[in-house]
Image (cartoon, rainbow, N blue to C red):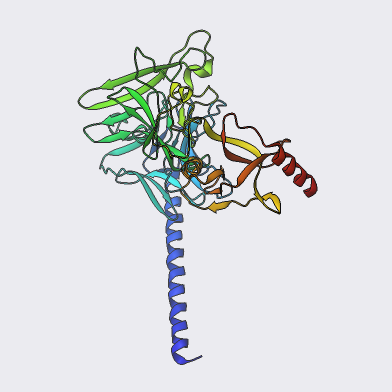
Amino acid sequence: MSTANWQLQLEKMKLLKLAMRTLYFSFLCFLIFCSLESTVSSETEILKQGEVVNSSTSLVSSNKTFTLGFLILDERNNYSYLAIWYTNNSMIRYPVWIGNRNEPIHNNSGVLTIDSSGRLIIKHNRGNVVLSAEQTTLDTTATLQESGSFVLSEVSSNGSLIRELWNSFDYPTDTLLPGMKLGIKHKTGKNWSLTSWQNPITPAPGAFTLEWDPLRRRLVIRRRGVIYWTSGGLEKGEFPHIRTEFLNRNYKFSTLRNADKEYFSYSLIYDELTSIERRTISGWQLDSSGSILDGDRPNVAYTGNCYGYKDEAQQSSGCELWKQPKCRKPGQKFQLRSGGFMVIEKPLGPRYAKGTKVGNSSFSLSDCRAECWNDCNCVGYDSYVYSTGCTFWRGKNLNFSQDISGMAKKYYVITEVTEPQSKFLTDTISFIQLLNR
């Protein structure tokens, strides 16, 4: 090795040692910080300055309705999130709020704390997530309230409230709790809206939003900015496309419109027939497919049949119209079918067709559907519920053959409502499956 190359290798080794020392020092500082802070006491609703919530501790609201702590949603990637969820409740099992949906923590290193300047911060070994940046010289505490809101406040020496600094209800994720708002605060320009998750285990923002339209007094679901579904205008306390009744959908709707703010919210009502849990437990979740769920209650809104074309059944449930590709017509839709895509080539006869995989990290299930719908050559697709990307089958010479046993893999297939199944292809694919056993 030449002298120049030898010197170059020495310089690289020096830089590597320096980088390792810097990384070690940073990690050591993080450990020192954690050791200096004290963890919160068990089953308290208040986080004080100098205390932390970590992966093994949590806050619990005064009547134990809500819990705040760190959750790992998918053991396969070990990402953790600061979350609020209903405590020990079988009706609603999903988190109702996520504090770091855009910045998952890659291990259990996350701690929630209030620093010396009063900022509410999630600290971890790769950086910080600042929830509240406003600084103050007064004492501050953060309280998990029985409503499910997490509130940072300035307090006096005797613990009495001076003013509210930050409230999680002003930063909703995908779930609307009773008392939360959808709308806008004109003074600050703050917009209250929901944004769906990317998929059932990834809280990153997905394709759908739920908003309040104060001019037409209606709830609006958008997909990538396009109006997808509406509740219809609120009249005499009711929406045309949201049913209410005391047993399951026991909702009371409220609105406010003045110079300062315009918003929608809901509360729960009940009579003697309403179950105890349904009197207090609710959370409208805008799920990753664009529907509004509320735990084990019937859907608040179902958007799976919204395709954007004129159809009496669709419009009667709140689906909106939007521009359609020329090749699609009313009556067509996607159906989840068991079987396989086949191409017929003479003289070889039918064979299985391979799809084209598209690995877009921002694609959700609805993006796969829209991509195929808008491509006149696409006849079906496969998407991955717990990851991103799609596989498409394109070609006018492709047919889908149903597996009559229902045991084969399922795909989304564009089909007419009354489309008959090809007996020839069904028999062919069944014969091929028999040969492959």
Coordinates of residue 395 in the picture (x, y in percent): 56, 48
View extreme (top): residue = 272
Q: Is residue 347 above or below residue 264?
A: below
Coordinates of residue 309 in the picture (x, y in percent): 44, 31
Q: Quadrant of residue 326?
A: top left
Viewed as shown, does residue 401 lie left or right of 172?
right
Coordinates of residue 194 in the picture (x, y in percent): 39, 34
Q: How many marks?
A: 0
Q: Quadrant of residue 32?
A: bottom left
User: Does the rendering let one see residue 117?
Assistant: yes
Nearest the viewer among 61 and 284 is 284
Q: Residue at x 53, y 34 (%)?
A: 333
User: Does the rendering let one see residue 98?
Assistant: no
View extreme (front): residue = 347
Q: Is residue 247 above or below residue 429?
A: above
Q: Is residue 352 above or below residue 155?
A: below
Q: Residue at x 47, y 78 (%)?
A: 13
Nearest the viewer among 427 and 198 is 427
Coordinates of residue 398 in the picture (x, y in percent): 61, 46
Q: Quadrant of residue 263?
A: top left
Q: Residue at x 52, y 19 (%)?
A: 277
Viewed as shown, does residue 129 lie left or right of 83?
left
Q: Is residue 34 above or below residue 68?
A: below
